Amino acid sequence: MPFLLSVNLGAASPTTHSEIGVTGIDKKPVTDPVEVRAPGAKGAGDSGLAGDRVCDLRHHGGNDQAVYAYAREDLDGWEVELSRPLPCGVFGENLTTAGIDVTGALIGERWRVGADLVLEIAEPRIPCRVFAGWLSERGWVKTFTAKAVPGAYLRVIEPGTIQAGDRITVVHRPAHDVTINLAFRALTAESALLPRLLVADALPEEARQRARRRAPIALDDSA
């Protein structure tokens, strides 16, 4: 049964790897219930989790990046590859999941978490220099991109309160094949795949615009 292994929150901490000098990537597990709601538009909206901090609002936060989820199984794989322990929250994820395939989740797929919260898969996480600096792994952006196991950003469809141990139930799977893995590869190293993303109605507008620019003129997803 899929469930939340941990819920992770972060405060602002100094960094030399961000233009603004602070980051919220250092997230730690909490045991108390956490309220989750839609944070607002990108550029103004913070994290979707009460008590969590997004510092660089120009690049992060907002409704399409309200919550970031990463699978414990994938962290375990990285532990082997990097030969170091990786505690829950170390990738900056808000939700560390167990028993659910985050990489194989479809754009627009919906999860019920706990009793009330409903989340929708929006887009993959794209690695940045803050992430690389935080992990202190040489060539991390290139390594992370090659692995194509990026975790998923989710938007809030119905607000609710969650805590570690809550069950995760997939309540909707859209009728297309655009997974987090496919979207990540298209948006990073394999741009020829971008037109395939257009069948995913829940794809964020910024990514949709990139896919449209790459698509043949005859391909019109608005028809």
Image (cartoon, rainbow, N blue to C red):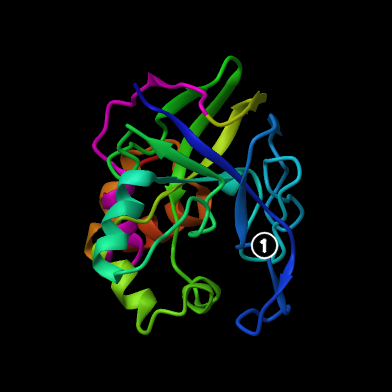
- Residue 66 part of the magenta-drawn span: no
Question: Where is residue 31 shown, x and y percent of the image?
Answer: 64, 35
According to the image, label 1 marks what residue?
A: 24
Question: Where is residue 70 shown, x and y percent of the image?
Answer: 42, 47
Residue type beneath disc 1: Gly
115 w.r.t. 216: above or below: above
Residue 219 seen: no
74 w.r.t. 199: above or below: below
Question: Where is residue 155 shown, x and y percent of the image?
Answer: 56, 38
Q: Residue at x 53, y 53 (%)?
A: 89
Q: Residues within 10 Å of mark 1 (few under 14, many from 20)?
A: many
Query: Front-most of 12 and 173?
Result: 12
Judging from the image, what secondary structure is the residue with disc 1 in?
loop
On the rendered image, what quadrant is the C terminus found in?
top left
Residue 167 seen: yes
Query: Front-most of 151 and 182?
Result: 151
Corner quadrant of residue 137: bottom left
Question: Where is residue 1 shown, x and y percent of the image?
Answer: 34, 21
- Residue 166 part of the magenta-drawn span: yes
Corner quadrant of residue 221: top left
The stretch in magenta equals 165-191
What is the number of callouts on the image? 1
Is residue 24 found left or right of 76 in the rendered image? right
Is residue 69 found left or right of 74 in the rendered image? right
Q: Which residue is drawn at 72% across and 42% down?
A: 39
The extreme top residue here reads: 115
Q: Which residue is drawn at 77% across and 54% down?
A: 44
Is residue 100 found left or right of 111 in the rendered image? left
